[in-house]
Image: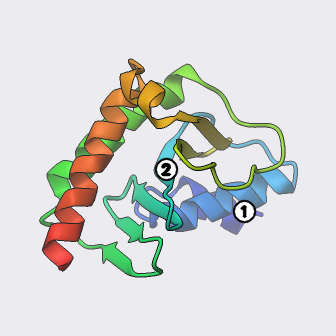
Amino acid sequence: MNALNEIAEDKQQESRVRTLAFNLLRAAGRSVTTKEYLGTIIEVRLEEGLDTLAVFADGGARYINYSGKVAVVEGKPSPFDDEVKRVIDSSKPIVAAIGPWEEERLPPPKFGHIRMTFLVSDGLYFGEGPMGAMQRDGLAGPLISAATNLLVRIVNTST
């Protein structure tokens, strides 16, 4: 467990790896740092399928299109650094305002809804609702705007 704790607490490790280490520590009943933000996953159900955008605290990002196509952003510096930072910055106030989800993970959001899942040291945090309502929300709206800008840049750069 000491090795897992070292990985979880090492800010030089990739955020995805740290998330897994925190998850394993919690599953083993170990106490972990609370409210340390590690990433944001945004899922939107379209008529064609599910679009997913993931942004990580270390600056990486992944976009999985409903068709199965994947775009990966890694490395520093990245041409997407500003957009990734805006997603991270608009995620942190949401994490500060809510707590971890204690129930089983839900199935993907239904058509017309958006789900924002936050990877946090002490568990998964999330918010979900109709797209229009979430866009008007004082906390969710800025995140949706930032994520949309990042997504547009990724798509325009990769096509």
Q: Nearer the viewer, mark 2 or mark 1?
A: 2
Residue 126 position, x and y percent, is: 61, 38
Labels 2 and 1: the sequence-earlier one = 1
Instruction: Give how far across and how far down residue 34 sits, in percent.
Output: 63, 34
Question: For residue 140, which quarter of the picture?
Answer: top left
- Drawn side of residue 34 relative to residue 130, left or right: right
Locate the C terminus by quadrant.
bottom left
Amino acid type, mark 2: Leu
Q: Residue at x 44, y 59 (%)?
A: 54
Image quadrant occupied by the N terminus: bottom right
Query: Which of the two residues, 15 or 102, is positioned nearer the viewer here?
Result: 102
Report which residue position mark 1 lands on. Answer: 2
Nearer-the-camera pick, 137 or 86 = 137
| Mark 2: few/some/many CA within 10 Å (<14, 14-19, 20+) | many
In-image side of 37 versus 60 (left or right): right
Q: 73 or 32, which is in the foreground?
A: 73
CA distance separating discs 2 and 1: 20 Å
Which residue appears at 14% of the width and 73% of the height?
157
**Label disc, if present, on residue 32 of the rendered structure:** none
Q: Which mark is residue 38?
A: 2
Residue 61 placement: quadrant? bottom left
Residue 133 in the image: state x and y as whole percent.
Answer: 46, 25
